[in-house]
Image (tube, rainbow, N blue to C red):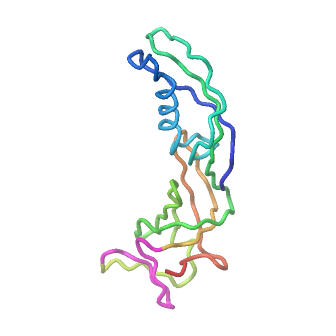
Amino acid sequence: MFYHMQLTHETVVHPIYFGPELMDIVLKKIYTEVEGSCHGNIGYVISITSITEIERGLLVDSGMALYYAKYFAIVFRPFKNEILDGIVKNVNSIGFFAEIGPILCFVSHQSMPQGFRFISKEFPNYFKSEDNEVITIGDPIRIRIIGVRVDQNKMFCIGTIVDDYLGLLVK
């Protein structure tokens, strides 16, 4: 789920910023480029905890300066069979999407307990069980991850709520 990792990053600075505050600008660029970004199999960088090293800048052909940095960061990465809490963001006839931090997780209607049916007569759409349990937009929900797809700069999960202690959380 959350890990403290040492990572590296390279950033380019335009010559207009060369001057006495150059290192402050390099630090700001590193923070803005890295925090909140997704790095393939590593996961989402939540926050940089410390920058341990910034190498001297290298001038490239365009006149820009290239800086390499090493830093420690808190990283969020979900794994198969992990149980996570999220918020329902969208409900449609085939299931619902829940937001778990920066990651979107889809739960199919086949991955819900028996008895849930889709209701679209009212807005917003919702799923309702035989016990009058309702899943709609904004509800807190507990999901078990059954699959994770990783793209270059985005992650997507498939989940289920068919298990003990999964499903709607007390509002």
Image quadrant where residue 73 sits:
top right
- Residue 76 spot, x, y in % from top left: 61, 51
| 69 over 31 or under it: above or below | above
* 65 or 38: nearer the viewer: 65
Residue drawn at (49%, 61%), measured in percent from left and top? Answer: 99
Residue drawn at (60%, 46%), measured in percent from left and top? Answer: 43
| 123 over 56 or under it: above or below | below
Q: Is residue 24 left or right of residue 142?
A: left
- Residue 105 spot, x, y in % from top left: 53, 60
Residue drawn at (46%, 15%), measured in percent from left and top? Answer: 64
- Residue 83 spot, x, y in % from top left: 65, 66
Quadrant in the picture for the N terminus = bottom right
* 95 or 170: nearer the viewer: 170
Residue drawn at (55%, 49%), measured in percent from left and top? Answer: 155
Segment tinted magenta in the rendering: 123-139
* 6 or 123: nearer the viewer: 6
Q: Would you say the magenta stretch is mainly helix, strand or loop?
A: loop
